């Protein structure tokens, strides 16, 4: 969500805060008009009609009474606002409006107080009256836009905020809330434009930088987002729990999962009931295959937000990682029933069906997901993998072409297509995809291992050995790379060297773990494995 939402109020507007100079002057006037120890009797003389011009000068008593009629109630309203006593503010505003129903500032004051109490209908009634009284002033337009934004009528809110900004281009409160509304309807570039205006004008606070960081994160401008978070920490009054939460979410998006957990731990230490931070830490644990901690965070989330449907989606994904197939399927079905257009949940159920060898059901889910979100690469990669498993190689290659049009530098798409070409015995095409993947990610050890397997299949053993050695330089304790190198040595009839690598591989990854994972092999690794099953007979 948009960060710092609760701080976008009218409390920082100078026109709505009692100025010290005004109060000081008011006290002087009041002391000169009336002595505090002498009670004043109400005048029995009727007030002159406002519709007729006065034929004589006003007496000091008349002037003092006129000032008291306006200034004392206003002073009471401002004192109640200063001490944050909303009920008194409403009471004093109502008393004043009973006598002066067209008071623009009082209507706005009462509307703002109604907003704080979430009495939105009453606030809107006051603001409609204020706009009718003085349509040329921006305050009521801005407040009405804020309330419509809180009611999730974002387009109507933007119209009112535009009207406020038309009347006052420097209304930074209106800019903040317009940015919030654009954010909620996913017009991120528009929101970024408004926040840039505030920051460039020098009126930004820590929350403004955090809001911009969150938008930059969504636009995948990770470096800009990180700079904004750093700038936000320079403000003394910044919400550190919020800042660490956004930083953790940024690192989660960058797949820096342990760093994300470290930041989210700091956020949760400051704010233990932060549901967004808990959800992101749960996802980070899940990506690190730490299912126990992920499930613990999810249970805390369910206590904080028992009515939120995402719990079924997350629990289904975690139980899928824990290989509790039936429990996972039950939760994923509940999640899809409540949120039928959630592509991520549909993709997880397709992954589960794939593990259960129910390929037709998995394929149906991926096709439904593609119809909902044609540009979703993950669901397209799942579809490619399923077609590969069903030996529908041409269909899989067609899916890969579409996926590469969306993102031509996606490593997983290139690896899956390389494997499909391998299965079709088009080794040169497979090698081209692996070369491209290596150029994009030269430090990706899995790409190097895949290319090593392909060279081994083509009997280019020296090239195969060179690639797997490069992979082991990146990650020396890679049991799979050791196994591949052992297989190359075996085909070169270097049996002693092969046995050494096989022994090391088994030490890192014992046989019982291999048997367990062989039955329930992870879809991502299986789909990226060039050549599928090992060709033990090839020598």
Image (cartoon, rainbow, N blue to C red):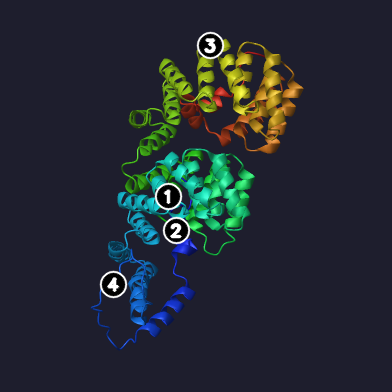
Q: Is residue 103 left or right of residue 228?
A: left
216 up-or-down from 229: above or below: above
Mark 4 sits on what residue?
A: 47
Q: In front of the other: label 3 or label 4?
A: 4
Residue 492 seen in this snapshot: yes
Q: Which mark is residue 10?
A: 2
- Residues packed near mark 2 inside 10 Å, few (<14), some (14 to 19) or many (20 plus): some
Foreground: 417 or 247?
247
User: How far is the residue under mark 3 from the one under mark 2?
Assistant: 63 Å
Mark 1 sits on what residue?
A: 146
Q: In front of the other: label 3 or label 2?
A: 2
User: How far is the residue under mark 3 from the one under mark 4?
Assistant: 96 Å
Q: Earlier in the sequence, mark 2 or mark 1?
A: 2
Foreground: 401 or 324?
401
402 up-or-down from 223: above or below: above
Q: In front of the other: label 2 or label 4?
A: 4
User: How far is the residue under mark 2 from the one under mark 1?
Assistant: 10 Å
CB of mark 2 within 8 Å of CB of mark 1? Answer: yes
The image position of residue 217, as x and y in percent, is 56, 43
Q: Earlier in the sequence, mark 2 or mark 4?
A: 2
Q: In front of the other: label 4 or label 1?
A: 4
Can you tell which quarter of the image residue 348 is in? top left
**Residue that appears at 51% across and 58% down:** 240
Q: Earlier in the sequence, mark 3 or mark 2?
A: 2
């Amino acid at each position: 969500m948009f960060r710092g939402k609760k701080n976008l109020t009218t409390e920082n507007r100078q026109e709505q805060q009692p100025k010290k100079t005004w109060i000081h002057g008011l006290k002087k006037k009041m002391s000169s008009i009336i002595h505090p120890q002498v009670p004043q009797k109400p005048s029995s003389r009727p007030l002159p009609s406002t519709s007729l011009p006065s034929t004589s000068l006003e007496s000091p008593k008349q002037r003092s009474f006129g000032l008291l009629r306006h200034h004392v109630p206003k002073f009471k309203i401002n004192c109640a606002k200063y001490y944050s006593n909303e009920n008194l503010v409403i009471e004093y505003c109502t008393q004043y409006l009973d006598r002066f129903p067209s008071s623009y500032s009082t209507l706005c004051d009462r509307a703002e107080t109604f907003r704080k109490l979430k009495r939105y209908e009453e606030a809107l009634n006051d603001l409609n009256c204020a706009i009718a009284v003085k349509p040329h002033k921006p305050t009521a337009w801005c407040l009405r836009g804020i309330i419509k934004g809180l009611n999730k009528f974002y387009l109507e809110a933007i119209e009112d905020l535009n009207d406020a900004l038309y009347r006052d281009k420097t209304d930074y409160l209106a800019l903040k809330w317009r940015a919030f509304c654009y954010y909620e309807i996913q017009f991120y570039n528009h929101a970024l434009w408004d926040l840039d205006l505030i920051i460039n004008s020098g009126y930004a606070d820590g929350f403004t930088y955090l809001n911009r960081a969150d938008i930059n994160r969504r636009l995948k401008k990770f470096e800009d987002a990180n700079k904004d978070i750093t700038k936000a920490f320079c403000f003394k009054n910044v919400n550190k729990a919020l800042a660490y939460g956004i930083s953790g979410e940024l690192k989660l998006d960058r797949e820096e999962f342990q760093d994300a957990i470290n930041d989210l731990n700091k956020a949760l230490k400051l704010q233990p009931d932060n549901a967004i931070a808990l959800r992101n830490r749960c996802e980070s644990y899940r990506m690190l295959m730490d299912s126990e901690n992920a499930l613990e965070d999810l249970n805390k989330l369910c206590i904080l937000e028992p009515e939120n449907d995402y719990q079924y989606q997350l629990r289904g994904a975690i139980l899928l990682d824990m290989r509790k197939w039936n429990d996972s399927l039950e939760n994923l079905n509940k999640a899809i029933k409540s949120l039928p257009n959630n592509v991520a949940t549909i993709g997880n159920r397709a992954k589960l069906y794939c593990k259960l060898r129910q390929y037709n059901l998995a394929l149906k889910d991926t096709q439904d997901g593609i119809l909902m979100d044609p540009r979703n690469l993950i669901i397209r990669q799942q579809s490619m993998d399923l077609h590969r498993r069903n030996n529908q190689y041409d269909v899989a290659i067609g899916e890969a072409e579409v996926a590469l049009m969306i993102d031509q530098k996606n490593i997983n798409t290139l690896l899956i297509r390389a494997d499909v070409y391998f299965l079709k015995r088009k080794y040169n095409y497979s090698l081209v995809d692996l070369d491209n993947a290596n150029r994009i990610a030269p430090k990706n050890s899995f790409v190097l291992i895949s290319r090593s397997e392909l060279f081994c299949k083509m009997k280019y053993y020296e090239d195969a050995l060179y690639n797997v050695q490069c992979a082991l330089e990146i990650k020396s304790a890679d049991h799979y790379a050791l196994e591949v190198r052992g297989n190359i040595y075996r085909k070169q009839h270097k049996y002693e060297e092969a046995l050494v690598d096989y022994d090391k591989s088994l030490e890192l990854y014992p046989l019982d773990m291999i048997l367990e994972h062989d039955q329930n092999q992870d879809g991502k690794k299986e789909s990226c494995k060039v050549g599928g099953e090992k060709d033990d007979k090839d020598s």
